[in-house]
Image: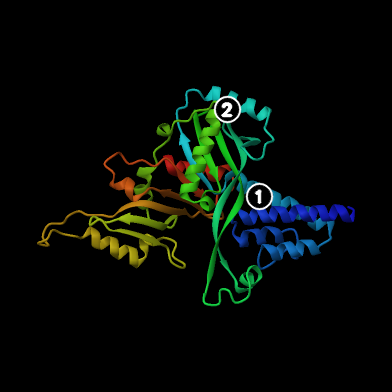
Amino acid sequence: MTEQEIEILQSSICDILTELEDRALVLYEVRTACKKASESFTGRNIDGIKANVLKNKSETDLTKLHKIVIELLSEHVSFDDKMISIYPEQDNIRQIETALETSFSAASKDKTKYACMKKTTLSGKRTLYQFSTGRKVKVRKNLTSAEIKKAFKKGMFEEYDQIIAVVSKYLKCYDFLILDKTKNRIILGVDQASILGHLQAMSSKSQLLQFLKKDLRISLDKDTAIDFFPKIRTFYKLPEDGTNGVIRITFETPSGTTHEEGARKSCIDLRSAPYHKEGAKGVRQEKDKDQKIPLNNDITPYKITSKFYRNNRNHLEISLKSSYINITSSNNKHLFDAFIKESRNENDLDFAIDKLIS
């Protein structure tokens, strides 16, 4: 390779590392992957890794690293950090497939809208159709004193201990549609769901559905999606056997108060933690005002994040996020979306889907 070609390769690697950082990958995962190419590709943060990439002029090391980070990004782009909805029993799946095939054979190059990015054949007569788009998200950022001095005149904010800025950040997002012709169902996935947050992820889903309906003539009715609401209690009641653990939960008590709890420090399942276990036990042991008749009370979880622990594999997270308004509504309670994190391939996605529909 010429010196210019080396610089182009280094620049490409740094761009991919930036995108991995934007996707909020755990630094340990990025660092571990990079060190497979060379021990020199390390750093305290992504910028540190980039600096060492720019120092290394080895064609062998850089070529190997380029392949590794592309594969790492591809795994996350295709399957990780998605808000999914599952639409079963789609009688018109053949027509939907024809519409997608036509669209992807004449893929749009307009990057400001949804672009048909790639089609991937999965196992079991399933096909993943991936779209790329851009979204802006507002992110809170703690400013250091050095950053404040650089941006403003010295002394302007001396009376403040901390300054927090809100910045607009452009995210590359890769939504998908999976056609499962064996089971006549469609799986819709909205990318970067945890970074977008619940409300913006829901808004992004609406935009995706509008695009599918307007541009591809594919209509997916929200009311035909699988209802995940009953799974909130199912996840809470899963056996406490070490294969799964609740790491975040929001619930209501019979008195009408709400509580939000998260697993602390090394706790892998807050259901076994004293602060949750004793509180829930107290609710279940409540009696009438004369303290004679048990009331058979229990907590009512309406948001839950469960982690599934698997030997020698990444621990997958599934979050189900209903709302207080939903559980107190007189209407039927529904939840059509689930958040999935740490999914790396179609087997992981299948694992998550099985937990949601079994």
Where is 303 relative to 165, above or below?
A: above
Residue lying at 66% horizontally and 68% vertically, measured from the top left? 44
Q: Which residue is mark 1?
A: 73
- Helix, strand or loop at label 1? It is helix
Q: Is residue 59 left or right of residue 188?
A: right
Q: Is residue 303 left or right of residue 127?
A: left
Residue lying at 55% horizontally and 31% vertically, measured from the top left? 212
Amino acid carrying label 2: it is Leu
Residue 224 is situated, as x and y percent measured from the top left of the image, at 41, 31
Judged by depth in the image, the label closer to the viewer, 2 or 1, is 2
Amino acid carrying label 1: it is Leu
Residue 195 is situated, as x and y percent measured from the top left of the image, at 54, 53
In this view, the residue in front, 46 or 226, is 46
Q: Is residue 271 left or right of residue 103?
A: left
Comes first in the chain, label 2 or label 1: 1
- Helix, strand or loop at label 2? It is helix
Residue 146 is situated, as x and y percent measured from the top left of the image, at 64, 73
Q: Is residue 46 left or right of residue 205?
A: right
Q: Which mark is residue 216?
A: 2
Where is 270 relative to 66, above or below?
A: below
